[in-house]
Image: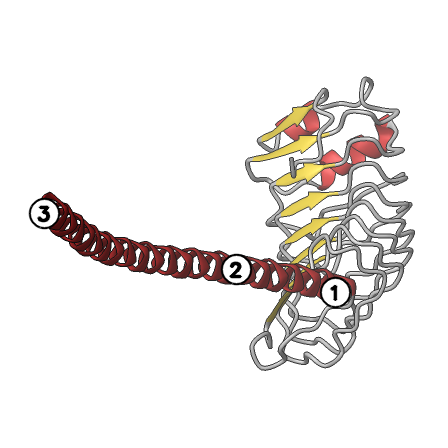
């Protein structure tokens, strides 16, 4: 009797163990599946983030490359200027671009040309008859021909090596800045419209402005003007209120400034600037 009871209890225990094992197995299986799903999701998220970072890096590299190409294009243009002829028919600006050569012959309607602060040793503007403003300061020009530019109003050619300058074919000229060249003479008889002249730092021994009845500002410092030459210059001044700067000439201290003052001109014997600073 006890043996049968023992066997029944043993069978019941074995059955309970089987049922419990099955239940635990199912839970473990579910846990494994859940963990696997979470791992797969995490992996997908990590891959996606990595792809996004790669795309961002590629975009940044592309933008930097484009910027470098643009900067290189600017440098190339500076070395060899390329101009849209339709866009720039009347105005060209090549200021401070390290140019050693410049051809503007194709721009017959050109009115303004700025090629200052370059390394030009030659400049041909003979095919620009409409030119009104020319700025070629700070180059290496030894000569400048403006005889084919009758409409010229402003000429800035200071800080070159020009030894002769003919403005006889520029009757409309109002402003002439030719300071710091190698001029020994300057004939202004054909420039009746001239109002401002800066010829500082040349080798002028005489200057006559009797034909320039509109001139009211003269910078003649640092030339070779004696007292007699300065007095002659004073006598040629028009009878208008003007300013003349004469420092740095041999005759600065001995000239008769009363001649200029009698024509309502203010005479400055100390200022050494160039009037364009």
Q: Nearer the viewer, residue 122 or 64?
A: 64
| Residue where numbered disc 1 is placed | 76
Name the secondary structure under disc 1: helix
| Residue where numbered disc 2 is placed | 54
Residue at the image point whose x is 63% and y is 43% from the top = 238
Quadrant placement of the C terminus? top right
Q: Nearer the viewer, residue 113 or 245?
A: 113
Residue at the image point whose x is 14% and y is 46% from the top = 3
Name the secondary structure under disc 2: helix
Query: Could you tell me residue 257's position as x and y percent?
Result: 71, 24
If you read the primary sequence from the N terminus, does the residue marked by circle 1 or circle 3 appear first?
A: 3
Q: Cα distance, mark 3 to mark 2?
A: 73 Å
Q: Cα distance, mark 1 to mark 3?
A: 105 Å
If you read the primary sequence from the N terminus, does the residue marked by circle 1 or circle 2 appear first?
A: 2
Q: Cα distance, mark 1 to mark 2?
A: 33 Å
| Residue where numbered disc 3 is placed | 5
Name the secondary structure under disc 3: helix
Q: Quadrant of residue 26?
A: bottom left
Query: Could you tell me residue 219's position as x and y percent?
Result: 71, 36
Q: Quadrant of residue 275?
A: top right
Q: Quadrant of residue 232?
A: top right
Extreme residue toward the front, this view: 1
Relative to residue 7, is residue 136 drawn left or right? right
Residue at the image point whose x is 62% and y is 57% from the top = 193
Query: Could you tell me residue 74's position as x and y percent?
Result: 67, 62
């Amino acid at each position: 009797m006890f043996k049968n009871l023992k066997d029944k209890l043993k069978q019941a225990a074995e059955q309970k163990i089987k049922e419990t094992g099955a239940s635990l197995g199912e839970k473990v299986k579910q846990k494994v599946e859940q963990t696997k799903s979470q791992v797969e999701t995490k992996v997908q998220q990590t891959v996606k983030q990595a792809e996004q970072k790669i795309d961002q890096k590629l975009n940044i590299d592309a933008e930097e490359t484009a910027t470098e190409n643009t900067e290189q294009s600017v440098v190339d243009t500076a070395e060899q200027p390329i101009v849209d002829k339709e866009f720039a028919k009347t105005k060209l600006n090549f200021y401070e671009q390290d140019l050693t050569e410049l051809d503007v012959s194709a721009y017959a309607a050109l009115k303004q040309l700025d090629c200052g602060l370059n390394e030009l040793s030659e400049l041909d503007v003979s095919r620009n008859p409409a030119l009104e403003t020319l700025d070629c300061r700070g180059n290496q020009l030894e000569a400048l021909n403006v005889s084919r530019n009758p409409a010229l109003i402003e000429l800035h050619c200071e800080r070159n090596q020009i030894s002769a300058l003919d403005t006889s074919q520029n009757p409309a000229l109002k402003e002439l800045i030719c300071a710091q060249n190698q001029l020994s003479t300057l004939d202004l008889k054909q420039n009746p419209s001239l109002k401002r002249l800066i010829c500082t730092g040349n080798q002028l021994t005489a200057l006559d402005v009797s034909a320039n009845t509109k001139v009211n500002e003269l910078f003649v410092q640092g030339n070779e003007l004696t007292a007699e030459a300065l007095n002659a210059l004073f006598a040629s001044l028009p009878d208008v209120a003007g300013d003349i700067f004469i420092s740095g000439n041999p005759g600065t201290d001995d000239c008769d400034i009363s001649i200029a003052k009698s024509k309502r001109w203010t005479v400055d014997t100390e200022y050494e600037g160039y009037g364009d600073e």
